[in-house]
Each structure stands twice: as C-alpha cells, then as structure tokens.
Amino acid sequence: MPAYNAVLTLERTVADIPPGSVHDILLVDDCSRDDTIELAQRLGIRVIRHERNRGYGANQKTCYTAALETDADIVVMIHPDYQYDSRVIPYLVGFIELGICDVVLGSRIRTRGEALAGGMPVWKYLANRALTVIENVALGQNLGDFHSGLRAYSREVLETVSFLNNSDNFVFDTQFLLQCVHFGFRLGDIPVPVRYFEEASSIDFRRSIRYGLSTIGVVAQYWLQRLGLRRSALFERAAAVR
C-alpha cells in the first residue's frame, strides 16, 4: 500500500481484504502529516516510512523492492484510500495463479453510468477514456482502465521490469504498464466498483493535465524504442532481486 495521509480510509481498506487472501500487508508511508503510521501499526501492518515526501512513484519503488525481499509469488498494489474495493483481491490473484495473466488491473469503468454514479467527475472520466483509448491502440491492448490504483503482478514481472528507472511521480504507473507490454507480459483486468468521495485521494485538474501529457510522452518513448530510433532506460531488463 503506497500511503500518504490515509488515516481516514486505511482501516476500511484493510477490513475488506478477505481473510486468508493475503499473507502479508506492507504499507510504505510517504512522510504523512497525519497518524497513518500509528494506525497501520495498531492494525498489525508492516510499515516502512519515508523520512521526506518523495512522491507516488518513489513510494511504489520502495513497496516493490521490499516485496521482492520476501518470498512473495504475487504482489498486489492497492491505494489505501478506499477508492478501490479490496474484496476483489482474490480474483485478481486468481488470474495470475491460473497462468492466464501476468498483470491484472481493477477497472473502475465497466460502464459510463456506473463510473459517473460512483462519483467520478465528468472531466476525469473523459480524460481517462481518451488516454485509455490512445494507450490501447498504441500498445495493442484492450484494457478498460489503464490508470487504476489496484493492480496485481507476478513476481516475474517485478523481477524483469526496471521500475527503479521510472518516474517518482504519478506517471510511474503508466511507465510500468508500457514496460510490461515491452517484455511481452499478458495484461488483463476485472471490474471494480467506483468510489469517489471526499476522503479518497485524487489529483486535481492541473496535475491531471500534466499527468495526461506525461502519459502521451511515455507512449511516444515506447514507440521510439520499438522502432529503434531512441533507446530508453525504461525498457532495460532489471536484475532479479531475491
């Protein structure tokens, strides 16, 4: 769980995780200004704390590096803001266990009506649809939501993708998926309910514009790499961490 000021939603997120569906819960706190760490410790969650705020992508780098130091075969990333339904975790994991997918995302957008009824702002819905269409066409995929904060990865994915070369900011997630496509991993998704409410984390309109432009830039990097016009460290193979 990459966390920042999640004290109001963390307990609900953890409480909904089906018993026996995970073996360990790790929370990386990106120097929260609230009592996220204290609550996580009371809940029996293993906590790693950043001494300064390093950004969403940097948080995930710490999450995955720590996960690879364990014997985990499958790693699930979920935002602890209760925007994503943690009850579906066994289903994400199941597709990987069955050998159907290497990466499984929770898609918030099964239908337009459900997404908007769940509180997703109209401008955010339209931006998500536009970027997801661009990414699906550019990458030959058919995902419903490229920008989900609920994801499951096989260990092989985390050992192959050079995620330490990625951005420390929000475009980290997009870079990670493009790296997965580059290495030929199989991507899939399942529907999850949409939950937008005051306590759930969300980037504002201005940061969303920057994020959208960064996403298109990463897609361009992918194609430059694929066409042999420009190599990027994003698409280097990482050394396995054990």
Image (spheres, rainbow, N blue to C red):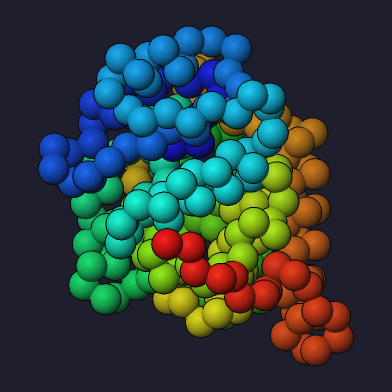
Looking at the image, residue 69 lies above or below residue 24: below
- Which one is in front, 94 or 74? 74
Q: Residue at x 27, y 41 (%)?
A: 24
Indicate the quadrant where residue 188 lies: bottom left
Residue 51 relative to residue 81: left or right: right
- Which one is in front, 72 or 185? 72
**Residue reaching furthest to the bottom:** 228
Q: Give how far across and how far down residue 210 sits, in percent.
A: 80, 44
Q: Residue at x 59, y 70 (%)?
A: 238
Residue 184 relative to residue 128: left or right: left
Q: Give how far across and how far down residue 48 sits, in percent.
A: 48, 31
- Check the picture and name the quadrant holding the C terminus: bottom left
Indicate the quadrant where residue 163 lies: bottom right
Q: Give how far across and how far down residue 40 sits, in percent.
A: 37, 20
**Residue reaching furthest to the left:** 20
- Which one is in front, 96 or 24? 24
Q: Residue at x 46, y 17 (%)?
A: 36
Q: Give how far across and how far down residue 125 sits, in percent.
A: 58, 44
Looking at the image, residue 213 lies above or below residue 63: below
Q: Does the image show residue 226?
A: yes
